[in-house]
Image (cartoon, rainbow, N blue to C red):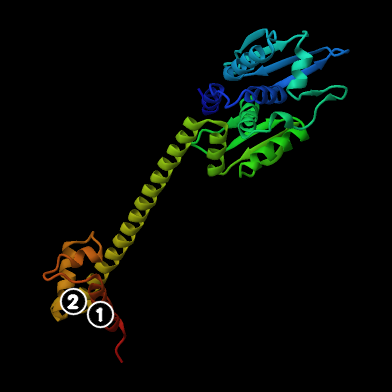
Amino acid sequence: MSFTAQVKDELSRIDGACDQCAYAELSAIMRVCGTLSFHGNGRYSIRVSTETGAVARSMIKFAHELFDLETPLTVRRSNLHKSRNYLIEIPEQARLEEALVRLGIIEPGCGLASGIPTMLLERPCCRAAFLRGAFMAGGFIADPRGDFHLEVALSGEGLAHGVARLIGEQGMVARLNRRRGSLVLYLKSFDEIVRLLRVMGAERSATAVEGVRRMKSLKNDINRRVNAEIANQARSTGAAADQLALIDEAERLIGMRALPPALRELCSMRRAHPGISLAALGELFSPPVSKQALYHRVLRLQALVDEARAPRP
């Protein structure tokens, strides 16, 4: 099951906080993934098509409980995409027009309503239910192990801007983008995605996303430390190689016996321990010598070698 399907399954099992929440949620599902047909003289039918079983389950449950509507269901399987498609057809029937008016989908004498049904969204819990239905019907959330991305595909300017406004009332900024004839509302901020999941009631999914983010942060921190350690080791190895080359040249141009005791000790210890850093090398001296003191010895040795290289008058 994809992460989107997991979130929708969780949302489908949430009970509204008040009696009106179910109307708001059903209205959103019908508005987002339903197709309304008008047959004249107050006669309508609706087709709802979805690839998510949770959406079909919620649609049928609310249609029966709220309006006692007939909801024939056809399940088709795509051999190409290895997925199921649920087709719910609500045929012409006595209570359908009343239901459409009650859900804010049509306005008596005016036809199809635009925007979102404000009379269903007076309470915060009902606004959350409408967002829940809209996401279930047209939403997608990326697997948080990859990118953080949530979107809802909507048809109609009024509906899209209305849903964006509802999200904005919760302190989030939803952006709109046109894609293949639809308006896509999306969030890419981790904090806003988690907040929207919690507003809709998907607490388990929000907690899962937070857990993935903590794991990502931990892995990134470990990677940074490992990379820093590798870089430090590479620099130490390169510096040690340069020091060994300098010691060889000092021995050739000056001779070990001619070097001051402190520099002879440096040369001997570096040759004995060629793969460690200067700081680690200093700890092997007796008594220990600081990294800065050893660095000054290297500079003194370099100065003597440079002097030995210089042509004599």
Above-or-below relation of 74 to 208: above
Q: Residue at x 74, y 21 (%)?
A: 102
| Residue 1's disc number | none
Above-or-below relation of 282 to 215: below
Q: Residues within 10 Å of mark 1 (few under 14, many from 20)?
A: few
For the residues marked 2 and 1, what is the alpha-carbon distance in whole angstroms?
Answer: 8 Å
- Name the spot of residue 220 as percent of width and height, x first: 41, 47
Three-letter code, disc 2:
Leu
Mark 2 and mark 1 residues within 8 Å of each other at the beta carbon: yes
Q: Nearer the viewer, residue 1 or 95?
A: 95
Q: Residue at x 29, y 60 (%)?
A: 237
Q: Quickly name the residue at label 1.
A: 300
Q: Nearer the viewer, residue 142 or 208?
A: 208
- Name the spot of residue 179 as percent of width and height, x first: 71, 34
- Name the spot of residue 213 as percent of width and height, x first: 45, 41
Q: Residues within 10 Å of mark 2 (few under 14, many from 20)?
A: some
Above-or-below relation of 96 to 1: above
Three-letter code, disc 1:
Arg
Q: Among all residues in the image, which is located at the extreme bottom?
A: 313
> Is residue 233 found left or right of 165 in the rendered image?
left
Q: Nearer the viewer, residue 57 or 108?
A: 108
Q: Residue at x 11, y 69 (%)?
A: 286
> Where does the C terminus fall, quadrant-wise?
bottom left
Q: Secondary structure at mark 2?
A: helix
- Name the spot of residue 299 as percent of width and height, x first: 28, 77
Q: Secondary structure at mark 1?
A: helix
| Residue 263's disc number | 2
Mark 2 or mark 1: whose residue is earlier in sequence: 2
Q: Nearer the viewer, residue 152 or 107?
A: 107
Above-or-below relation of 279 to 107: below
Q: Is residue 31 visible?
A: yes
Which quarter of the picture shows residue 300? bottom left
